[in-house]
Image: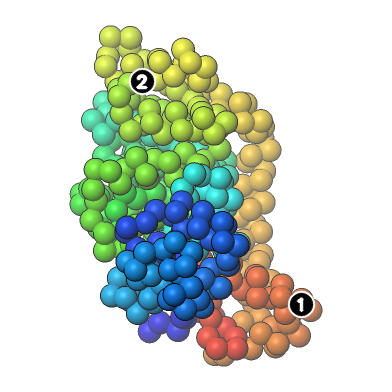
Amino acid sequence: MQHTTISDSCLRWLSLSLFEKRSPEFWLTWLTHNQFSVEEAFNLPRQALLDTGLTESDCTAFKLDRKEVTQAVSWYSPPDSRVIIDIESAFYPKSLRQLTSPPLVLYCEGNAALLRQRQIAIVGSRKATLQGVGLARDFAAELGSVGLTVTSGLALGIDGAAHKGACATPGNTLAVMGAGLQHIHPKSHAKLARQLVDNGGCLVSEFAPGVSPRPYHFPRRNRIIAALSDGVLVVEAKIKSGSMITANLAADAGKEVFAIPGNIKHPLTEGPHYLIQQGAKLTTCVADMLEELGIELADACYEEAARQQGLAFESASGLLAHVDTEFTSVDDLAARSGLSVSQVMADMLEYELVGKVSAVPGGYVRVS
């Protein structure tokens, strides 16, 4: 049973995002130019919208009862860890807002709080060698063990190996999809996607749940992977590949780029070797990456242990402990915890995003 309804603000951004004739950049520019909030824009009469230069077709974007909007809302189910995060949400990653055309909404299934964790992307060829697959898996497992979230695209080869390696540590991998979350691509990774979510990871997409994969979706996915991550590790890749696009996007954004060297005669080492020539960090172990990122290994291990202890303590003794399995009002939570109502609501939104509570009118219900 779905207890939570989508917020009015998120619904408006969702409606704009689902209007395929205009890009996110167009709507953001239009709102800024006219000095409208998204709420003000949706309250304008049709003629006022036309007076700003929009077409009759554009006005369709402001109809909240469209089929595609209804379908997306029906997918939204926070108790089942399905959430939609709009660009104005406090949970929307700041790094994505820096993109020229940032997603107006993100569809997330699983632990959406990972979006705000420190991330390292691991990317590479779909037709990776056994050695490359092993390296991706081992690097991901070690990065996850020190508290870094491993981000990739759930593709065959290096991507899949990275997710599998990171799954060795609960809650430490995030997959950015090139299709809607109802269309896991490739289909052979459907089991891996479920394992990832069940293990505390997260699936993320800017595409509505029912959207099938298309070739032009994947460069768009790559820009999100690059933007979310503090650095990108390229394991094996040809020079002309999506992995190189991701690495170049990261470099252009001032992110760290890491590359694993290999056999100079193998075509899949062309990409990493080229990146090294262009200034990427030659990487042979995780310590190389942590050094470049300014993270001491001992500090990273301590922070991860503290994070796990903090999560356990917070679940047992924090605000969550004051939420009943039956209805608990916001005022009661504030009284029990000693926090302000605004702080209670902010904290409860975080619990809602990770599926620990469900919002109901006037309060919350704890999800067992």
N-terminal of the two: label 2 or label 1? 2
Residues packed near mark 2 inside 10 Å, few (<14), some (14 to 19) or many (20 plus): many
Count of numbered marks: 2
Q: Residue furthest right?
A: 338
Observer-nearest residue: 306 or 249?
A: 249
Residue, disc 1: 340
* In this view, 276 is above or below 320: above
| Residue at point 34%, 25% (across, down) | 236
Display coloring: rainbow
- Report if the CB atoms under discs 2 and 1 are less than 8 Å apart: no
Q: Quick check: can you spot residue 135?
A: no
Report the residue marked by disc 2.
271
Looking at numbered disc 2 in the image, what kind of residue is underneath it?
Answer: Gly
Left or right of residue 149: residue 202? left
Q: Secondary structure at mark 2?
A: helix
Quadrant where the image shows the N terminus: bottom left
Point out which mark residue 8 bears: none
Q: Quick one: SS at disc 1?
A: loop
Instruction: Residue 98: give x, y in percent of width and height.
Output: 56, 45
Q: Position of residue 34 (x, y in %)?
A: 56, 61
111, 57: nearer the viewer:
57
Nearer-the-camera pick, 275 or 261: 275
Q: Residue furthest top?
A: 265
What is the three-letter code of the residue carrying label 1? Answer: Ser
- Residue 277 percent location from the top left of the image: 46, 12
Q: At x 66% / y 30%, what residue is drawn?
A: 294
